[in-house]
Amino acid sequence: NVDRENELWNQAVRSGLLGGIQLRADADDFTALSDNFQLLNMPRYLLIDRQGNIVEAFAPPPDQRDIKDWIDKHLGNS
């Protein structure tokens, strides 16, 4: 998250509204992340395997129907 409204974001995280793993980046970190992961918009979902390799750079959001099947397929678990 790169919102300038730091406290609003912190409140949303604490309240559990956002769910999942939430990360925040300052401007320098965001520049490095966008260069390395080709981040063009937010939010952005990646599928990363246990070895840290990017399996899918444009993964669907976690609330997508049948997401578990999609993940299993892309990780070779099916």
Image (cartoon, grey):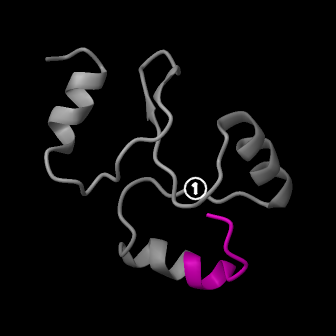
Given the current orientation, which residue lies at the most extreme right position?
Answer: 28
Residue at the spot x=47%, y=71% of the render?
Answer: 13
> Which sits in the foreground, 22 or 77?
77
Residue at which label 1 appears:
23
Q: Is residue 6 above or below residue 59?
A: below
User: Which stretch is magenta?
Assistant: 1-9
Residue 53 locus on image (x, y percent):
52, 19
Q: Is residue 48 above or below residue 76?
A: below
- Magenta stretch encompasses residue 6: yes
Q: Give SS at disc 1.
A: loop
Residue 29 locus on image (x, y percent):
79, 50
Q: Amino acid at mark 1?
A: Leu
Residue at the spot x=42%, y=19% of the render?
Answer: 50
Q: How many marks?
A: 1
Residue at the spot x=14%, y=45% of the render?
Answer: 66
The answer to whether 7 appears left or right of 15 in the picture is right
- Quarter of the image where one finds residue 38: top right
Q: Is residue 40 above or below residue 7?
A: above
Residue 54 locus on image (x, y percent):
51, 25
Q: Quadrant of the C terminus?
A: top left
